[in-house]
Amino acid sequence: MLTQFFNWRTGLAVIAIAIVTGTIFYSNFMAKKIAMEERQKIEQWVEAVKDISNPNVSPTNLSSKILVENNKDIPMLAVNERDSIFESNNLDSVRIKKEPQYLANKLKEFKRLHPPINWINPVDTLQTNSLYYGESSLLKEVRYYPLIQLFIVALFIVITLLAITTRNKSTQNQVWAGMAKETAHQLGTPLSSLQGWVELLKDQPGNEKIATEMFKDVDRLKLVSDRFGKIGSTPQLEEMNVIEQVENMIAYIKRRSPDKINFGINSFGDAAIYAKINAPLFDWVIENLLKNALDAMEGKGAINITIKKEITQVIIDVTDTGKGISKQHLSNVFKPGFTTKKRGWGLGLSLSKRIIDQYHKGELFVKNSETGKGTTFRILLKK
């Protein structure tokens, strides 16, 4: 499904890029063509002015027609050798009257756009006049059309991708919740039966030790079932001592870890730090992080947990001295199914992030990791 989504997304991007690229090339071609035609119009207008202004030549009807009809939309300014404006055309007459610098600013703008068209004054042959011109509305529209189209296409792609991503996340959430609840449901019946058998064992002399150990395992299974049952529903958050919860999980994991693994916890002198958590789910996250650290160290090393309170949040860092995470894998750490281990489904970290981010409204991320030196996972919880 992810491959299909990636291929579809890539195809959409390629088509959009092709459309925009083609439009840009065609628009540039049209813009150049229109610009050439506009310059020809301006040159014809200058020739018509020279013809009408020349006292030695009788003006033709064509010249008069060109002056009247040939240029109705190209803004232009005629200046003498001292850059004094003596003629303007197709500019805002209202702004000319109200803004003294309007024509001067337009002259600067036109000088940047096109080289001038010069002609000798027929009346005074020692005087050279120049005509500067801008761009018509049509030319501006043709130039800016690709940018507008690019914005529309980009907006369309973003909206489409957001819709697809949201839909996929919603479907994924439903699958997660459905699997978790079904797992909890399936565990419920054998757990009830096991509890009954444990009670029977307790009543028989000589089985007390066995019954006690089995009761611990059954209790553990009940905890697992309870955790899965809370996935997909809104858990109740309570003000609890985070230090105590972490210490309990360290004690649980320590009994099941090699002797060469050293555990340490640092709360910077605080005996209790409170945050709103759901105890079973929070314990699950700490357990997953500790087990992940154990797997990374392969039998020896150190796991250190620091718990620090700030004004608005509680910071929990879980640091190991394991093999670390390579840069190419950092972005995939919390994706469902990703694992570097030979066994496992790659769901532990993904579930942990979901529990912290969605249910506790906090954050879980990799603070830093260095290959061969270790990794630090950070949890941020609201106080």
Image: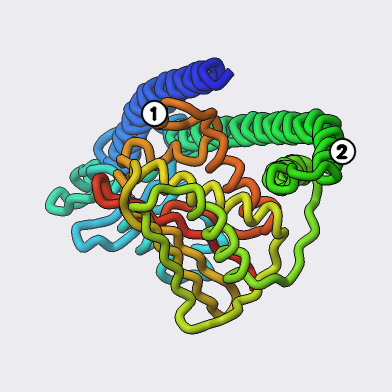
**Which residue is label 1 attached to?**
31
Q: Determine the residue positioned at 64% across, 29% down.
A: 164
Secondary structure under tag 2 reads: helix
Count of numbered marks:
2
Residue 119, picture quadrant? top left
Is any atom of residue 73 visible in this view?
no
Q: Position of residue 169 (x, y in %)?
A: 66, 34
Left or right of residue 185, residue 158 in this image: left
**Which residue is label 2 attached to?**
196
Q: Position of residue 357 (x, y in %)?
A: 62, 53
Is any atom of residue 95 visible in this view?
yes
Asked whether the beta carbons under mark 1 and mark 2 sit within 8 Å of each other, the answer is no
Towards the viewer: 116 or 46: 116
Secondary structure under tag 1 reads: helix
Amino acid type shown at disc 2:
Gly
Q: Residues within 10 Å of mark 2 (few under 14, many from 20)?
A: few
Towards the viewer: 308 or 367: 308
Q: Determine the residue positioned at 56% across, 81% down.
A: 271
Q: The C terminus appears in which quarter of the rendering?
A: bottom right
Towards the viewer: 67 or 158: 158
